[in-house]
Image (cartoon, rainbow, N blue to C red):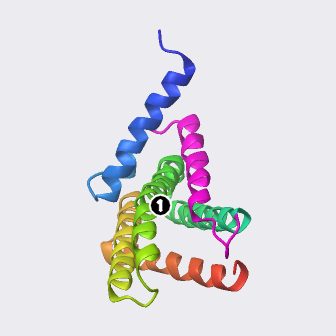
């Protein structure tokens, strides 16, 4: 008989697999085996990864505020989008998918940041190329989730994900620097 912790771990590992597949544009939120406890583990892991972004310029409070801002904005977009389309029951899986995608992308970003930013100057063409490529890939994964959850066109989902990125960037620059 499986213990409760093994059950939660099993759900979380299944979710993590789907998060990775969604980052590769191979899965979608409706396939995600949602479990509120597994989602809580995802959120805790995401905040835990924030420790790797702490440096002399940004303390953990700023990093955690950025994560919280990102999650709040995604929750608002999902809540509004699903309410407009009358798909409110899709909220847990869709929000979990978006947080999970950001978790996986953050896991990938940590070694990239350490590799590129430690060994090159900030204006390097390679750093800028990798940053833009990574950003576009992240927005594509988020856009896919919006497309599938809201049942909208690819251009509209891309505009929503880009709008989210711009709004998030503006708020971070204005309030969290």
Report helix, strand or loop for mark 1. Answer: helix
Q: Which residue is pictured at 56% across the width and 60% down the height?
A: 52
In the depicted structure, whether residue 146 falls above or below residue 161: above
Q: Which residue is pictured at 48% across the width and 55% down the height?
A: 103
Place of residue 23 in the rendered image (x, y in percent of width and height, measured from the top left)? 34, 58
- Say left or right for 155 vs 142: left
The residue sitting at the front extreme is 119
- Say left or right for 74 vs 159: right
Place of residue 135 in the rendered image (x, y in percent of width and height, measured from the top left)? 40, 75
The residue sitting at the top extreme is 1
Q: Which residue is pictured at 61% across the width and 46% down the height?
A: 44
Most foreground residue, 28 or 132: 132
The residue sitting at the left extreme is 26
Place of residue 6 in the rendered image (x, y in percent of width and height, measured from the top left)? 50, 22
> Residue beneath label 1, please?
106
Most foreground residue, 129 or 25: 129
By secondary structure, the bulk of the magenta-drawn segment is best described as helix
* Residue 79 quadrant: bottom right
In the depicted structure, whether residue 80 falls above or below residue 87: below
Q: Which residue is pictured at 36% across the width and 46% down the height?
A: 18
Would residue 44 be counted in the magenta stretch?
yes
Most foreground residue, 123 or 40: 123
For the record, the magenta segment spans 33-59
Most foreground residue, 31 or 70: 70
Could you tell me how many numbered marks the image carries?
1
Tell me the quadrant of the picture where the C terminus can be found: bottom right
Q: Can residue 7 be seen in this view?
A: yes
Place of residue 26 in the rendered image (x, y in percent of width and height, measured from the top left)? 26, 54
Would residue 138 be counted in the magenta stretch?
no
Q: Can residue 31 be seen in this view?
A: no
Label 1: how many residues lie within 10 Å, few (<14), some (14-19) or many (20+)? some
């Amino acid at each position: 008989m499986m213990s409760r912790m093994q059950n939660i771990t099993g759900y979380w590992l299944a979710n993590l697999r789907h998060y990775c597949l969604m980052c590769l544009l191979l899965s979608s939120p409706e396939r995600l085996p949602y479990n509120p406890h597994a989602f809580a583990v995802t959120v805790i892991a995401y905040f835990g990864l924030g420790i790797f972004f702490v440096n002399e310029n940004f303390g953990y409070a700023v990093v955690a505020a950025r994560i919280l801002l990102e999650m709040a904005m995604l929750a608002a977009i999902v809540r509004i989008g699903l309410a407009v389309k009358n798909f409110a029951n899709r909220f847990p899986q869709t929000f979990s998918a978006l947080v999970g995608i950001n978790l996986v992308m953050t896991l990938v970003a940590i070694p990239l940041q350490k590799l590129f930013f430690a060994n090159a100057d900030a204006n390097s063409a390679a750093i800028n190329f990798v940053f833009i490529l990574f950003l576009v890939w992240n927005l594509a994964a988020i856009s896919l989730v919006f497309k599938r959850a809201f049942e909208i066109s690819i251009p509209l989902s891309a505009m929503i994900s880009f709008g989210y990125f711009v709004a998030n960037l503006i708020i971070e620059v204005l309030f969290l620097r």
